[in-house]
């Protein structure tokens, strides 16, 4: 089988080829400033070799997902899966030899590094019988193998750097061939860059990067200026899979393109200044200005100290010293809890806030209702808030007893969507849609909602039915009830 692919043409118009078989054994490093054409080069390489070798793409910007429209790649949106699921997927990829694009664009930089590390380690740790050859393309490699510490935690940086080092240093014997692209060689860890034997160097302007690129290409320092003059989409190539001598390559065209397209000049809007002002500020001007809360009445420091001393002295007596904020008796705490939960859930985005923020908000609201201390600890609050999202604010109410017994088999984080479904069944209402279940579960990912419903069904907590019209109803076996089809 011919393993040679054409990636472009040289200065004379002759085709420049890359030997994929040799590339798998010797790896590839692509360098060039932003806008030099690195992603276009990688796309050309992936398209031309799609029928020859399994491909795995680490895609931090979501640029390569369009390959799936024409080729057999499977797009994995990392934001839809947990760490355990990403690791399991990495192992299955090696077993089934699937070409996959790991899209990380919905994650922040630290989550991208952590996810990529887990994924690459799963590829690396696959059983020996699954060590099939695979081309692993990592765009923006300086993010995953930085030469210096940055804004991310040291734990995440070390894990990501270790995974990239394993890919480039020890991956060959496991069938993994790294093809990495970076904006600057100075930003990329030297242990990762040093293991590549094939180089495609694009336009760069900093002296330190030009000098390193010239060294890798075997060029004299005075020839390094040529790297600064390269046009977009032009690279200098060298390596056993490309050429034994440096060769100038103009990368060929591709059949697919990024969804973002290229940025060009567009005519400015023709709206009049007054119309533009109306569009920009109309809603802001219509909103009432926030009113500041009245300042609290100041209390003298001596008075505060006196109250603290009297409170400590009388702590074990039946008479309690007067305080600035008298506590509500314990039996009255439950109405305050319910009121605080109702106020919190009046905010439609409340379910998507971090748990620590929600608990702090709950604590402040309890204090505002003159409770001397927060009546629920974090674990108790987590369960009460989940029940409240499902519509159960008072779990002590006898009418919810059977519902809560049916929910006992599920984890606490699944209580809210289950209670919402069960309450709809008890009230004879329509089945909650995915958006409603997502708000209850705290996610905007349709994929996570589908997996949540599948999990609850496997646990026997629910039974899902769909009619020929595509309408869904969900039954609760333990209650003997079902929602209306929706």
Image (tube, grey):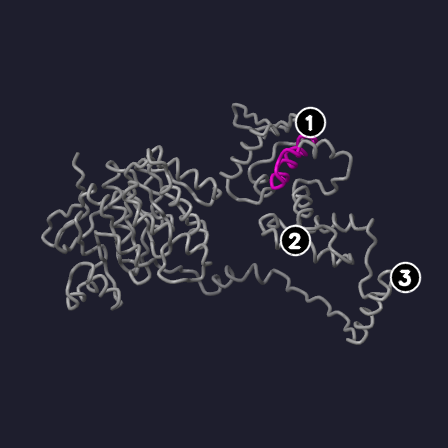
Residue 313 position (above or below residue 243): below
Name the foreground residue: 470 vs 439.
439
Residue 426 screen position, x and y as percent: 70, 30
Name the foreground residue: 39 vs 269.
39
The numbered disc on residue 438 is none
Name the foreground residue: 466 vs 27.
27
Marks 1 and 3 sit apart, C-alpha to C-alpha, by 50 Å
Image quarter (top left, top right, bottom left or bottom right) of the N terminus: top left
- Point 57% across, 45% down: residue: 442
- Point 20% across, 56% down: residue: 234
Q: Mark 3 points at which residue?
A: 319
Q: In this view, does 104 lie to the left or right of 1?
A: right
Q: In this view, does 429 lie to the left or right of 434?
A: right
Marks 3 and 2 sit apart, C-alpha to C-alpha, by 32 Å
Mark found first going from the N terminus, 1 or 3: 3
Front: mark 3 or 2? 3
| Magenta stretch contains residue 112 | no
The numbered disc on residue 359 is 2
Element class at badge 3:
loop
Element class at badge 2:
helix
Residue 247 screen position, x and y as percent: 14, 54
- Point 53% across, 44% down: residue: 444
Residue 320 screen position, x and y as percent: 87, 62
Q: In this view, does 81 lie to the left or right of 189?
A: right
Residue 258 screen position, x and y as percent: 33, 47
Front: mark 1 or 3? 3
Marks 2 and 1 sit apart, C-alpha to C-alpha, by 32 Å
Magenta stretch in the rendered image:
407-428
Q: Is the magenta stretch mostly helix, strand or loop?
A: helix
Mark found first going from the N terminus, 2 or 1: 2
Q: Name the residue under label 1.
A: 479
Do the residues bearing badges 2 and 1 touch, measured as CB atoms within 8 Å?
no
């Amino acid at each position: 089988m011919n393993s040679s692919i054409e990636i472009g043409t040289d200065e004379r118009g002759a085709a420049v080829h890359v030997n994929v078989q040799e590339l798998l054994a010797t790896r590839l490093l692509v360098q060039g400033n932003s806008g030099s054409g690195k992603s276009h080069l990688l796309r050309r390489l992936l398209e031309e070799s799609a029928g020859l070798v399994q491909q795995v793409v680490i895609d931090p910007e979501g640029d390569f997902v369009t390959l799936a429209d024409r080729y057999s790649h499977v797009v994995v949106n990392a934001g839809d899966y947990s760490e355990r699921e990403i690791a399991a997927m990495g192992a299955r990829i090696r077993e089934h030899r699937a070409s996959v694009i790991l899209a990380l664009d919905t994650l922040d930089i630290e989550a991208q590094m952590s996810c990529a590390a887990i994924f690459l380690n799963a590829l690396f740790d696959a059983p020996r019988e699954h060590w099939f050859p695979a081309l692993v393309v990592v765009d923006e490699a300086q993010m995953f193998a930085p030469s210096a510490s940055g804004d991310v935690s040291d734990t995440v940086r070390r894990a990501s750097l270790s995974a990239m080092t394993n890919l480039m240093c020890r991956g060959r014997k496991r069938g993994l061939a790294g093809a990495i692209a970076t904006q600057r060689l100075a930003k990329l860890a030297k242990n990762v860059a040093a293991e590549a034997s094939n180089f495609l160097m694009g336009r760069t302007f900093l002296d330190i990067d030009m000098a390193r690129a010239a060294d890798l290409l075997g060029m004299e320092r005075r020839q390094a200026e040529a790297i600064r003059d390269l046009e977009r989409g032009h690279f200098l190539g060298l390596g056993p899979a490309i050429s034994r001598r440096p060769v100038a390559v103009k990368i060929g065209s591709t059949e697919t393109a990024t969804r973002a397209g290229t940025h060009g000049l567009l005519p400015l809007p023709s709206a009049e200044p007054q119309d533009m002002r109306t569009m920009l500020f109309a809603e802001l001007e219509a909103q009432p200005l926030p009113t500041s809360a009245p300042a609290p009445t100041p209390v003298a420091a001596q008075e505060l100290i006196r109250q603290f001393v009297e409170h400590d002295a009388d702590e074990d007596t039946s008479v309690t010293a007067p305080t600035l904020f008298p506590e509500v008796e314990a039996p009255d705490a439950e109405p305050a809890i319910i009121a605080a939960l109702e106020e919190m859930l009046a905010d439609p985005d409340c379910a998507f806030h971090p748990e620590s923020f929600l608990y702090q908000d709950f604590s402040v609201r309890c204090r505002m209702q003159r409770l001397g201390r927060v009546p629920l600890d974090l674990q108790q609050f987590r369960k009460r808030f989940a029940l409240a999202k499902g519509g159960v604010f008072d779990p002590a109410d006898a009418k919810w007893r059977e519902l809560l017994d049916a929910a006992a088999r599920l984890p606490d984080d699944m209580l809210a969507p289950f209670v919402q479904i069960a309450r709809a069944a008890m009230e004879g209402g329509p089945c909650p849609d995915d958006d409603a279940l997502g708000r209850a579960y705290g996610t905007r990912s349709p994929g996570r909602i589908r997996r949540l419903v599948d999990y609850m069904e496997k646990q026997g907590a629910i039974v899902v039915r769909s009619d020929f019209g595509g309408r869904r109803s969900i039954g609760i076996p333990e209650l003997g009830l079902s929602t209306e089809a929706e």
